[in-house]
Image (cartoon, rainbow, N blue to C red):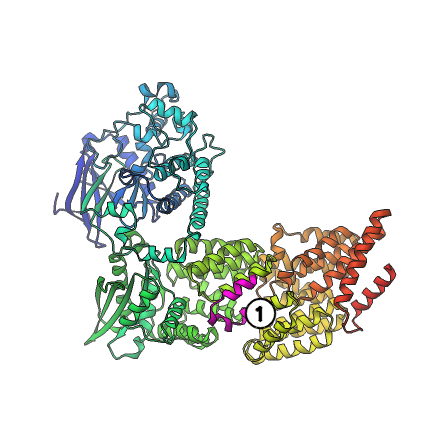
Amino acid sequence: MLGKTISHYQILDKLGGGGMGVVYRAEDTSLGRHVALKFLADPAAAEPLAIERFRREARAAAALNHPNICSIYEIGEHEGRWFMVMELLEGQTLKHRLGSGRIDTAEVLDLAIQIADALDAAHQKGIVHRDIKPANIFVTSRGVAKVLDFGLAKLASPVAAASDRRAEEGAQRAPLQPKDAPQRAPVQHDMPTAALELDHLTSPGTTMGTVAYMSPEQARGEEIDTRTDVFSFGAVLYEMATGQQAFRGTTAAVIYDAILNRALAPATSVNPELPGEFDRIVTKALEKDRNRRYQSAAEIRTDLQRLKRDSESGRTDRAATETALKPASKSTGFRRAALIGDAVLVIGLTVGGWWFYHRGAHTLTDKDTIVLADFANNTGDAILDDTLKTALSVSLRQSPFLNVLPESQIAKTLQQMTRRANTKLTPEVARELCQRAGGKAYVAGSIVSLGSEYVVELKAVNCQSGDTLAQEQVTSASKEKVLGAVGEAASKLRSELGESLATVQKFDVPLEQATTSSLEALKAYSLARKASGEKGHAAAVPYDQHAIELDPNFAMGYHALGDDYSSIEQLGRASEYYTKAFQLREHASEREKLAITADYYANVTGELDKAAQTYQQEAETYPRDSKPYDDLAFVYAAKGQYEKAVEADSQTLRLSPNEVSSYENLANYVLALQRFDEARQILRQAPAQRMDHYLYHAGVYALAFLGADSAAMAEEERWFAGKPQHENVGLALTSDTEAYVGHLGKARELIKRAVDSAIQADSKENGAIWQANAALEQAAYGYPAQARQAAAVALKLAPASQGAEVEAALAFAMAGDTGRAESLARDLAKRFPLDTQVQELWLPAIRVQLALDRKTRPSVLNALEASTPIDSSIELGQLLFVNNLSCLYPVYVRGEAWLETGHSTAAGAEFQKILDHSGIVWNCWTGALAHLGVARANALQSRATQGADADAARVRALAAYKDFLTLWKDADPDIPILKQAKAEYAKLQ
């Protein structure tokens, strides 16, 4: 067979053989890759049933496309013999690895999470493995777990084989019982027995290895589901951490008894270095009652990820850096074992077998970081300046294996090197930067022209030793095809640097599709990224705009514009460009596609659950990228889930300590949880260059307000006054503070200045929001005519702004203009049918207020009942378009409605909720009027009760009135709501 071509596979050499067939290493001549080619035995030796199962189960396994599952590429028939084409892996089985003892905890968790992810993927496809054991788990030479025999495992699982045989032949057999296990151990397969087993796997003629990992339901011969894999995985997990089988014995009967009846010694009693939480996870996985076990692989994966995170968070930064700098060959015991010589491993020559070819150590691990040097453009063609580095970055960042140092970290490191942010990254500078950043290698690219052709070369260099790790050279026939050449060279480089062929193929969209086929458009996009890094997102807008003009199908260009406008608080414009990017998302890499999709859900349709799911998927696919965690935190905050937001944003800062806005965002989330001192500490830790960001100063202002520090507030007001782009934000903040204490005249003047400043800064949407806020304030304070006027101006300034429209609609309702409010509510319901906040916060609040306007008690009560959100945390959710996190307008409106209908306790609870969340409300007028709301609720209760209860309620009411009147002691005296409050207080006294 050697040298022969079967289909498009050229046989290179023989890897092994046995009773079930022969395995060859072959070259796929169509794709230029090496594969494992396994031929079944002679047709005369194979039963028709075995062949049919082989075909059926191979198709099932081939349907599983996952980086932690060994891939089946195809099956076929040649001269009457069936063959299977599979992924050729390098490394050793977990069973072989465990032969040298238990694995250290960090590697156990890393491998376990990968295995659990593979099981979850299979279970989602309806496939139960049924034979999870160390022999069916492979660990590549770079530490990636690969689960073997998916879909084929039931042929290798004795009980399952018997079950299949019963189903197919119609026989009735009694379930297997522990007492007769030695006599009835299911050793007979309905397929010929394999004669050779070269990697210490359980021989098909015996069952001891498989029996030790059976679930109780398997051992009893019962129907099984995905939870059987969870149990088997728990046994593997225990063995990985302790070096001992979970269920041991000299006979099958003893092992069955242990599985069914015996308690397991805690893993920590065998390996004291394990964290206590590990015992809980293993114990739950090995519950004998499957209803008390983890109900899915996803559940145990989540717990393992949490344990891994908690374990890693205890390490010092120095330790983490030292780990990152260790050579891959010395990082773990497995690495040493895997690197001993070049070896061919032939695994499991049964029908479900897999074969792996080991060539030696990979260059990088998935823990290493690389730095991109600037491209050396030797063509003299300026269109290629910066462009090719951007193209290379996009291509390499498709990889979930390679960790490219982000631009923000490069800028920070250059600053530490006392170099300018725009310093050209020559190979020499890149190497020094790589060393300082704790990276492993830098990648330098160059291009030269030879007549009409262009030669692209990429070189990866170890930044410590200067040794060349990998080098690729590709020739392009023309300038128009240069991007394709860069992409081709990058793909080859990824493989040379240690990435698996499976992920290179899965995440390798051609650059012309992942970016643009227009070099001019990509040039403009590259200049935008440079401008953004040096001067901020506003500076990037004209370049990104030019990029999409040059290529109207440039998805990344539209997405970048959405980010630009979102960052400068022009959310309406951002929504337009996010929508266009989503429509063109197929013209992007997988990484960009996930980001585009998630941003569309978060910022356009408002589907927060879908956004969170997509950001989570992006974070899991690219776990070392900080941005998905940052975005996920933002969505959690919008849902009012601030604990989750803190957890996600902490991951952002762990991965990128200098990530833009992360300190400000984290401080806001902590502030929302009323942890003011912690928020101050976070802002103090912000890098020096971040202290020029307006969100930082907004956060400092909020803390100063909450701490009644007028001097600090004045200092922040001065900072805003000197920044034309952000002056309107500072003026709006100051206006809110004046209104909070009843200085309504000053507040009106400041808000007018804020609107004018926003318009001058080309931010009409901000101006509209300030007007809409003022409209709500005027209505609440008792000026309905001014409220209607301000709301109308807001809509005129930014008619397409969701934020301005929802606030204006509520303002019209509070000001008694029911016709305008109802019209806007209908428009909002039509335009944003899926938006979580619109549907669960704004529309219910508007309807409650409209019911209040009609003054019919039943309609108010019905509206109140309908306004209660399914998830109560959503009412605390951060709003995208206000200075503070949220004024909690819906909560305030519900409080007013409960008062109107005579429900004092419910009303008091709503107003108290506002007071209890000052870290969300900041200086919004609702925080001031909530004191009055509490007073009125207690006064109502005192009138509705008698005796001691009435007296106690009256005392509480007087105290709350006094709080409000003290707060407004210097307020403008003619404000209607102040006059009412004074009259109510006097009457109560």
Quarter that holds the N terminus: top left
For disc 1, the marked residue is: 698
Question: Which residues fall within the magenta stretch?
Answer: 679-700
* Rendered view: 260 above or below 686: above
**Whole-percent x, y for residue 715 in the image:** 60, 75
Prevailing secondary structure of the magenta residues: helix
Q: Which residue is nearer to you in this view: 505 or 417?
A: 417
Label 1, secondary structure: give it. helix
Quarter that holds the C terminus: bottom right
Residue at the image position 34 percent from the left and 57 percent from the top = 322
Give the amino acid type for the residue marked by disc 1 in the picture. Ala
Q: Is residue 204 left or right of residue 713?
A: left
**Whole-percent x, y for residue 420 in the image:** 37, 76
Q: Is residue 731 magenta?
A: no
Q: Is residue 695 magenta?
A: yes
Can residue 687 be seen by looking at this rendering?
yes
Q: Which residue is nearer to you in this view: 904 or 601?
A: 904
**Whole-percent x, y for residue 297 in the image:** 43, 41
